[in-house]
Image (cartoon, rainbow, N blue to C red):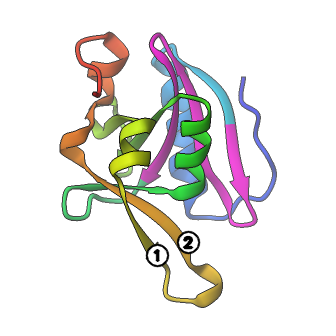
Amino acid sequence: MMNSQSGNNGNDKSRIRILCRRAEKWDLVVESTYSNNRGLYCVKIGTPHGSVYCITKSYQYKNLASFPKNVVQRAYSRSSSLGIFFGDDLYMGDGYVFTSDTVHDYGIENRGGSDKDDRKIWVDIGLEDGVNFGDFVTGREFPE
């Protein structure tokens, strides 16, 4: 069941909401969603292999997955995985899963946003450190 919180904007809501609907079609559980004053930014999806805190991005940049630091910390403190999906359609093959330990311990922090009030700390990790979301869900491959 989705635990939506109020405060949506036109950007993130559509991709995160699409991901929530996709997860339910994949017979996965939307355990909770997370939002801030700008809207939804993360969904916790229950899989046969544990919970995955997922975000969405329009596109890949330099073969990196970039996670907001607060999402990394939340997943790490709960020993859960992290997931990222790229694009607008959000199929299982468009996503990657990482252990929160790997992202927490080996990810590189950077500051995103050009406006002082809009800056966030992001944690970047190479896509090669993750596995395909579909492979993870089906048990074919797990991140190290």
The quarter of the picture where residue 102 lies is top left
| Residue where numbered disc 2 is placed | 120
Residue at figure coordinates x 56%, y 38% from the top left: 75
Within-10-Å neighbours for mark 2: few <14, some 14–19, many 20+: some
- Badge count: 2
Image location of residue 103, percent across then percent down: 39, 46
Within-10-Å neighbours for mark 1: few <14, some 14–19, many 20+: few
Nearest the camera: 72 or 64? 72
Residue at figure coordinates x 61%, y 36% from the top left: 77
The quarter of the picture where residue 30 lies is top right
Question: Residue 34 in magenta?
Answer: yes
Residue 76 visible from this viewpoint = yes
Question: Residue 73 in magenta?
Answer: no
Looking at the rendering, in which quadrant would you find the C terminus? top left
The quarter of the picture where residue 108 lies is bottom left
Image location of residue 105, percent across then percent down: 39, 47
Q: CB of mark 1 within 8 Å of CB of mark 2?
A: yes
Q: Which structural element holds mark 2?
A: strand
Direction right: furthest residue? 6
Residue at figure coordinates x 29%, y 27% from the top left: 143
The magenta segment: 33-56
Image location of residue 51, percent across then percent down: 54, 24
Give amino acid for label 1: Arg
| Residue where numbered disc 1 is placed | 111
